[in-house]
Image (cartoon, grey):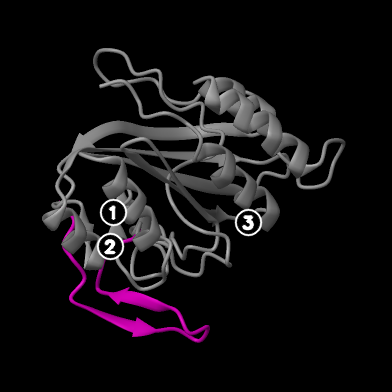
């Protein structure tokens, strides 16, 4: 169980970040950090993410890689990725984004309060959510750069509370849900700053997708695109 950061500090870019808290919360104090004005929310790009079955749930299928300029533009890939995600085809999302999955973790269901901190935790205490599903997926682009996608789906009791949670998570310094495997990611120096983050809600489900670099120099537009497309994925089957 991830522990709630005890305090926050302000970085050189004016963003509030948790002190002593595990990775997986983005620069906004865990949940959405510098979002680059791109709004917030839930999950992993291209993830070929979930087709969970019985024991572990197979995430992400194989497929290509991604480059921000090459033969096909990032915008074009994101459009195709969103189309694939809306149809619940995670493997197709990966192929559309030309990314290659390295490893994945989840899906895992958890209790919302225990896996959150900051104002987001306060919100789910006052407005209980039914469950929280999380997934992380590491992927490579065509140049061999590596990034990781963190996805979270919070199933609320009402559409209003899902919308309010998104609005809260869109703001810097308000806390967040911990990424699945946050301790292991932090040990590798991975930090979710909120720079490549998207959030949306559909009905009672709030989804947040965030991407962080792991190795090399993944293209910023590509990481934004992955988060954007991944935020359209439906929750994994339980």
Image height check: is 177 above or below 172? above
Residue at x 36%, y 50% (from the top left corner): 163
Numbered badge on residue 72: none
Which residue is drawn at the image coordinates 81% and 41% (left, top)?
73
Determine which residue is flagged by label 1. 178
Residue 143: percent from left, percent from top: 73, 44
| Circles 2 and 3: CB atoms closer than 8 Å | no
- The reply, left or right, for residue 165 in relation to residue 221 is left
Q: Is residue 33 left or right of residue 139?
A: left
Circle 1 — which element? loop
Work out whether residue 180 can be spotted.
Answer: no
The residue singled out by tag 2 in the image is: 22
> What secondary structure predominates along the stretch shown in magenta?
loop
Secondary structure of the residue carrying numbered label 2? loop
Residue 18 falls inside the magenta stretch: yes
Residue span colored magenta: 1-23
């Amino acid at each position: 169980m991830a522990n709630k950061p005890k305090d926050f500090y302000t970085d050189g870019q004016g963003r509030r970040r948790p002190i002593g808290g595990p990775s997986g919360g983005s620069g906004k104090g865990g949940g959405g950090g510098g979002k680059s004005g791109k709004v917030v929310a839930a999950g992993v790009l291209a993830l070929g993410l979930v087709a969970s079955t019985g024991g572990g749930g197979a995430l992400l299928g194989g497929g290509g890689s991604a480059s921000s300029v090459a033969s096909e533009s990032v915008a074009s890939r994101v459009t195709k990725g969103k189309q694939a995600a809306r149809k619940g085809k995670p493997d197709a999302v990966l192929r559309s984004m030309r990314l290659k999955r390295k490893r994945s973790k989840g899906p895992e269901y958890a209790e919302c309060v225990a896996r959150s901190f900051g104002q987001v935790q306060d919100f789910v205490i006052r407005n209980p959510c039914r469950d929280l599903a999380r997934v992380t997926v590491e992927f490579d682009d065509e140049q061999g750069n590596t990034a990781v996608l963190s996805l979270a789906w919070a199933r609320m009791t009402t559409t209003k509370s899902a919308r309010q949670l998104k609005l809260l998570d869109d703001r810097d310094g308000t806390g967040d849900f911990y990424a699945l495997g946050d301790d292991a990611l932090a040990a590798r120096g991975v930090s979710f700053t909120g720079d490549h983050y998207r959030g949306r809600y559909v009905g009672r489900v709030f989804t947040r997708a965030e991407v962080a670099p792991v190795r090399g120099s993944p293209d910023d537009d590509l990481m934004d695109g992955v988060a954007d497309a991944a935020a359209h994925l439906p929750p994994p089957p339980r």
